[in-house]
Each structure stands twice: as structure tokens, then as C-alpha cells.
């Protein structure tokens, strides 16, 4: 996250040399060059009371008196191009600003992960529509030099079982590879079925981290 916020996605960042985070309308992830008291204090100074952020680290850590730990999640990072051919690629289209409301509605219904007012501007998104409604999509989120994250893969419950998310992942992956980057994604470590599917699609496990959700104290000491 620190690398993304200091290189390719610096325009989406706020903070300083000790801690940075995505502007909250895009995402709530943050990063530091080193996890220490100075970085945590710098991060806290940039947050409103009760505001949430997520920080990835190799393991659990004590965030000190300025934060409460809301949750911790085990994340597996997987890397690689998604294999296989896209079936009937003409069915899909690139989504744009006019689709923002439909994208938000689909995310709220399916809950693939965090989504905010301008998350759709972090990268390219593609979708599938039926009867004038967006029912499946996938897109890009975090970017570091040479790598782009596949994210927000989701499908309306009525349209599951037709392979739409897999084909959308392939489309997003192909776009990433075409510009010279390698795709990666994150999945909860306990989601064995997703891990098995992504390995079947050609991604390999790279590392596992703890994602810690922090809340800035409403009444800091």
C-alpha cells in the first residue's frame, strides 16, 4: 500500500513521509515505510475521530493509544495472469462515470469488498448488462510499478453459475497484461473455494498478510 501511494497512485493519496492513505472517497487503505509509533501518530493526525482505515502487515501489532482495533483479517495475495479465453467478449463493455450508480448498487447487493464514492475511478472496470441492468463486473484497484490489482469481482445472485465473473476477470487481466503489468489480487485465507478457483485460473500464492482495521479514537488521550 505504501508503494502504491508513493508511486503510481500518488494522485489518490494524502499524508506525509511517515504515513499515507488513500483519499477516503477512493479507498480506506493506508501504508507506512515502517510500522512504528511515529508512523501511527502521523496517520492518526490525518484522521477524523472515529474514522476507519485498513493497514496490512505481516502479523498482529499494537496500534497504541490512538486507535481501536475493529477487526483483523488474514489475506492471501495471489499473482499471475488469468488463463483461458473469454467467451463472447462482445457481451461485455467498459464501464464509465455514467455507470457509477449502477456499480455502487451492484456492490451493495453482492458485497465483494470495500467500495466508496470514487472507487470506480481507480482503474478500468468492465461489466455485463441484462435487460438494461448491470448484473456482473470486475475492475482494477491498487497499482504499484509493474503490477495491478484485480478487484470488485461480483455478480447478481440471479446470474451466478454462468461463468460471468471468471470471464470478467479474464478481460481485466488481459487489459493489465496488455499494458505490461502483472495482475494480482487478494482473497480471505479462509475462502478455500476461491483460492482453489484462482489457482486453477493460473494465479499463484505469493504471501499472506494480516489486514488490521483501525478506528481513530473518538476521545484520544
Image: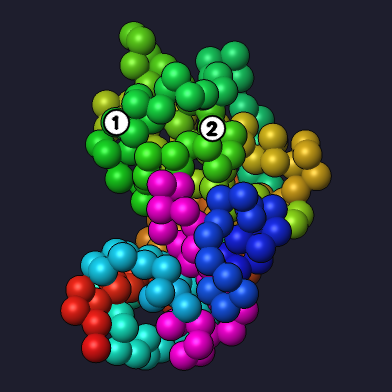
Viewer-proximal residue, 161 or 205? 205
Q: Identify the residue at the far right of this view.
A: 180
Specify the quadrant of the image occupied by residue 89: top right
In this rendering, position of residue 47 left or right of residue 108: right
Mark pair 1, 2: CA separation: 15 Å
Q: Residue 164 appears at what percent x and percent y?
A: 46, 29
Q: Residue 146 appears at what percent x and percent y?
A: 76, 54
Residue 32 part of the magenta segment: yes
Q: Residue 59 appears at what percent x and percent y?
A: 46, 85
The quarter in which the N terminus is drawn is bottom right
Circle nearer the N terminus (1, 2) = 1
Residue sitting at 24 percent across and 88 percent down? 221
Q: Residue 212 appears at what percent x and percent y?
A: 38, 74
Viewer-proximal residue, 220 or 99? 220
Q: Is 29 placed above or below 106 here?
A: below
Viewer-proximal residue, 5 or 58? 5
Q: Identify the residue at the far left of this view.
A: 219
Q: Which residue is mark 1?
A: 105
Residue 35 part of the magenta segment: yes
Q: Is 109 placed above or below 49 here?
A: above
> What sort of colour scheme is used for the picture?
rainbow
Segment tinted magenta in the rendering: 20-41
In this rendering, position of residue 204 left or right of residue 54: right
> Callout 1: few (<14), some (14-19), or many (20+) C-alpha neighbours within 10 Å?
few
> Callout 2: few (<14), some (14-19), or many (20+) C-alpha neighbours within 10 Å?
many
In the rendered structure, find residue 125 and report the number of the disc placed on it.
2
Amino acid at each position: 500500500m505504501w508503494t502504491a501511494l508513493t508511486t503510481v497512485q500518488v494522485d489518490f493519496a494524502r499524508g506525509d513521509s511517515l504515513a499515507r492513505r488513500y483519499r477516503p472517497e477512493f479507498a480506506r487503505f493506508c501504508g507506512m515505510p515502517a510500522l512504528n509509533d511515529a508512523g501511527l501518530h502521523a496517520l492518526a493526525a490525518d484522521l477524523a475521530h472515529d474514522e476507519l482505515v485498513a493497514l496490512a502487515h505481516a502479523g498482529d501489532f499494537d496500534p497504541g493509544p490512538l486507535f481501536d482495533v475493529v477487526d483483523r483479517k488474514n489475506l492471501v495475495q495471489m499473482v499471475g495472469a488469468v488463463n483461458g479465453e473469454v467467451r463472447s467478449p462482445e457481451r461485455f463493455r467498459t464501464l464509465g462515470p455514467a455507470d457509477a450508480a449502477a456499480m455502487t448498487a451492484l456492490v451493495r447487493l453482492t458485497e465483494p469488498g470495500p467500495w466508496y464514492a470514487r472507487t470506480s475511478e481507480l482503474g478500468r472496470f468492465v461489466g455485463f448488462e441484462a435487460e438494461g441492468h448491470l448484473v456482473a463486473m470486475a475492475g482494477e484497484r491498487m497499482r504499484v510499478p509493474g503490477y495491478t490489482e484485480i478487484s470488485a469481482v461480483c455478480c447478481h445472485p440471479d446470474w451466478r453459475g454462468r461463468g460471468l465473473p471468471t470471464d470478467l476477470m479474464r478481460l481485466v487481466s488481459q487489459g493489465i497484461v496488455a499494458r505490461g503489468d502483472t495482475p494480482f489480487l487478494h482473497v480471505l485465507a479462509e475462502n478455500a473455494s476461491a483460492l482453489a478457483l484462482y489457482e486453477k485460473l493460473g494465479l499463484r500464492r505469493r504471501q499472506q498478510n494480516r489486514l488490521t482495521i483501525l478506528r481513530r479514537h473518538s476521545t484520544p488521550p
